[in-house]
Amino acid sequence: MARIWRRARRVAEVVSDDGERAAVLNVDTTRPIVLTGSAARIWCLVDGRRTDDQIHAELGSDYGAEPGTALDEEIGREVSRFLAELASRRLIEEGPADEGLAEDAFGETNSPRHPVGPDA
């Protein structure tokens, strides 16, 4: 059964305009990680709507891998491995995207997902 992945609630991120680099931090830890290339692409595909199979298919398409080929199977294994690694670091979690809710620095939920404050 395919799983839907979303970014964890307590994660901060900065993604380059071209999507080729992403700096990601679980705010409960002290070390950010920098993702590049296909790792950054996978990160951008984790949106709470796509399943792991859909992420695999999109990445395979990016690399021109025909479904069922050795390259496609290798991409599928690597996507699964990488998603598991992101989950173990508490950067992603299973489940659909939240309904536009975000936690602020104090753990309060704000709606919709927009900055809070007088300039918002």
Image (spheres, rainbow, N blue to C red):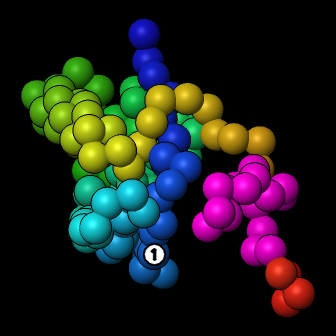
Residue denoted by label 1:
14
Please name whichever residue, 109 or 11, is drawn nearer the observer in this view of the structure: 109
Going 61% across and 67% down the picture, which residue do you hit? Answer: 105
Q: Main secondary structure of the magenta part?
A: loop
Farthest residue in the front direction? 106
Give the residue at the far right of this rendering: 118
- At 35% from the left edge and 44% from the top edge, which residue is drawn? 90
Report the side of 7 relative to 40 (left or right): right
Residue 31, position in %: x, y? Answer: 25, 68
Residue 75: percent from left, percent from top: 20, 37
Q: Quadrant of residue 35?
A: bottom left
- Characterize the local packing of mark 1: few (<14), some (14-19) or many (20 or more) Cα atoms within 10 angstroms: few
Q: Which residues are magenta?
A: 101-116
Q: Nearer the viewer, residue 1 or 106?
A: 106
Task: Indicate whether 19 appears above or below 80.
Answer: below
- Asked if residue 102 lies in the magenta stretch, the reply is yes
Position of residue 75 in the picture relative to residue 21 (left or right): left
Q: What's the amino acid at mark 1?
A: Val
Asked if one can make out residue 118 in the rendered structure from this viewpoint, the answer is yes
Task: Tell me residue 108's x, y (percent).
Answer: 73, 56
Is 48 contained in the magenta span? Answer: no
Q: Is residue 20 visible?
A: no
| Residue beneath the point at 83% across and 81% down | 117
Viewport quadrant of the N terminus: top left
